[in-house]
Image (cartoon, helix red, strand yellow):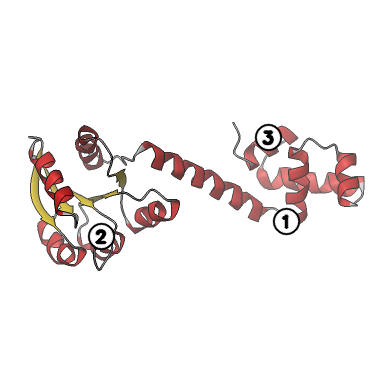
Amino acid sequence: MPIRVSIVEDLAEVREGLVELVQSDAELLMVSSFKDAETAVEKLPLLQADVVIMDINLPGMSGIECIKTIKEKCPGTQFMMFTVYENDEKVLHALRAGASGYLLKRTEPQRILESIKELNQGGSPMSSNVARKLLTIFVHEKVKQKKEILSDRENEVLQLLADGLLYKEIAERLYIGHGTVRQHIHNIYEKLHVHNRTEAVNKYFERN
């Protein structure tokens, strides 16, 4: 059976271009296209498309809000953002709303077709620079979580360890005793589940 595709895009030339692109592929079936989220909210639950290509910047309700509103009503539908926005905030908001794919509008037509099929098969197609942004965000979030595990003093000690300072130098820098430094480092190893300085620094800063 062909993959049933719907499009939500306010710009007529973009919407019509996507419709023609989908119709050009025998593995896809174009079932509907909408120029605003409000109409999509009303119609999409009735259509139950396999894949919805969704713009973010729509008049009135945004594409992200549209997904939030209808996601539960369309349990079998996969949503792919198709937008000019590639900033971290937009990407995260879209994915948290329920989108599984994120393509920029400058994506090549063949890649769009491949992404629709990939999304329908359970994949999460994304433009390469968006994927890199997400990886960076993921690393930063993991580092942030580790910082929250450690106390403020332990964070200071580990940062100085990463800078290559010896125990004695850390003690002098922080105006604490050598034994206190050792205790902080012991606590750091325990909390991060590591056994030495190199492992602690690599795990904390997500280094290879």
At 27% from the left and 38% from the top, the residue drawn is 107
Q: Which residue is mark 2?
A: 71
How much space separates mark 3 and mark 2, taking CA atoms?
42 Å
Residues packed near mark 3 inside 10 Å, few (<14), some (14 to 19) or many (20 plus): some
Percent of width and height locating residue 125:
31, 40
Q: Which residue is mark 1?
A: 151
Q: Is residue 73 left or right of residue 97?
A: left
Reading the chain from its start, which is encountered first: label 3 or label 2? 2
Residue that carries the numbered disc 3 in the rendered image: 199
- Percent from the top left, x then y, of residue 179? 90, 46
Mark 3 and mark 1: Cα distance apart in space: 19 Å
Residue for point 15% across, 49% down? 13
**Helix, strand or loop for disc 1:** loop
Instruction: Look at label 3 and name its amino acid.
Output: Glu
Toward which corner of the image does residue 28 lie, by quadrant?
top left
The reply to whether dot 1 and dot 2 touch (C-beta < 8 Å) is no
Quarter of the view holding residue 127:
top left
Amino acid identity at mark 2: Lys
